[in-house]
Amino acid sequence: MRYVFWIILVLLIFVRVMTTRPVYSDGDKIKISTKVSSEPIKYDTSQRLILVGLKIYLPNYPEIGYGDKVVVEGIVRDGKLNDPKLISLEPVTGILYKTRNNIIRVYQKSLPEPHASLLAGLTLGSKAGLLAGFWEALKKTGTAHVVVASGMNVTLVASFLIGILIILLPRRKAIPLALVGVWIYSLLSGFDAPIVRAAIMGSVAFTAQAFGRLQAASRALFLSAGLMIIVKPDWITDLGFILSFVATASLMLFERKISSLIRFVPGIFREGLSTSLAAQIGVAPILFATFGQLSLLSPLVNALVLWTIAPITIIGGIGGIIGLASVIVGKAIIFLSYPLTTWFVWIVGVFG
């Protein structure tokens, strides 16, 4: 009977994806009216969006942000929208979006670049302000996933928190506390779709794992992913969704084994290295296919910087929220992250 359930689930996913997926042929002239669900990547002369599965390059001005409603027209060519024209732009008005943007402005007032943008990326998944050179260095070192949609970031933060907490507490108590931290992080990040996806999948999988049921955790992970695709079929091609799913599965399968093999590594770096190596087993091919680059030193670089993600996120979250009420106090708190972001920027610069 359990096989019947999984067969039905797969069939439902297949039907939903095939019946709701837009089909475009090269040469089709289309008009897209939708909300921007992932923050555009800014280049020197353009900004890249992905709407309904198509890559779209528009001029840098007017600036388009996450959550904005846009209407774009163009001609489909090779998975891209050629000669795109921005017909209309309706800036986002929701309170969460405004709060998120205001926190980013506090970061910009508190730290120089690329530290401010790095802090915004780690804490809120924002990559709009990343300098082109620093973004390239992130891709070359295999650390770009830290600021891409935050799906991968949520999974790594969850695993890192669990690794730290199990030193002090039994695993069954450590995992719930770590998941509370993940959901607080998700709330601070504005509850955008990629973060919610990663938080849900991580919560279900790690909760099952807390009771020592690896098989139950894997089934819960696949069930969560399947139900999410049924609800919103276009997530099946979303990078944040794919990274969060694959990274969580890789961590569940390989992290403990790798950690036992590298006991000779100092504690704080061992957790980061085992987490990075486990996640890289699954996500490295995806990152290579997406960004066209693969760094053999990526696990080492990730291990050297991964330990900074949790404290930077916590400091950034607290400082950003307090900064909304008092910029001076917020800046003082955020400045505590400067040594950590300096280390991160330096490591990425050295290896990138």
Image: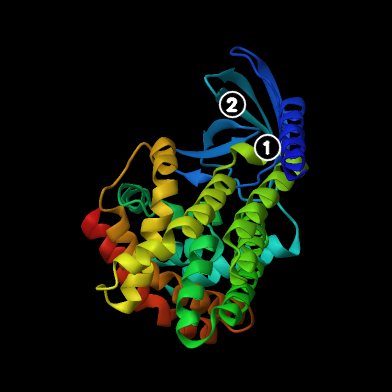
Count how many numbered circles sit on residues in the image: 2
* Residue 299 point in image, percent of width and height: 31, 57
* Residue 302 point in image, percent of width and height: 34, 61
Tag 1: residue type? Asp
In the visual, does 98 lie left or right of 253?
right
Mark 2 and mark 1: Cα distance apart in space: 21 Å
Tag 2: residue type? Pro
* Residue 312 point in image, percent of width and height: 45, 74
Residue labelled with disc 1: 234
**Tag 1's secondary structure?**
helix
Residue labelled with disc 2: 84
Res 119 visible = yes
Viewer-proximal residue among 183 and 79 = 183
Q: Residue at x 60, y 71 (%)?
A: 210
**Tag 2's secondary structure?**
strand
Q: Dot 1, crowdedness within 10 Å: few (<14), some or many (≥20)?
A: some
Q: Quadrant for the N terminus, please.
A: top right
Is residue 30 placed above or below 330 in the rendered structure?
Answer: above
Res 114 visible = no
* Residue 55 point in image, percent of width and height: 55, 32
N-terminal label among 2 and 1: 2
Viewer-proximal residue among 283 and 131 = 283
Viewer-proximal residue among 233 and 347 = 233
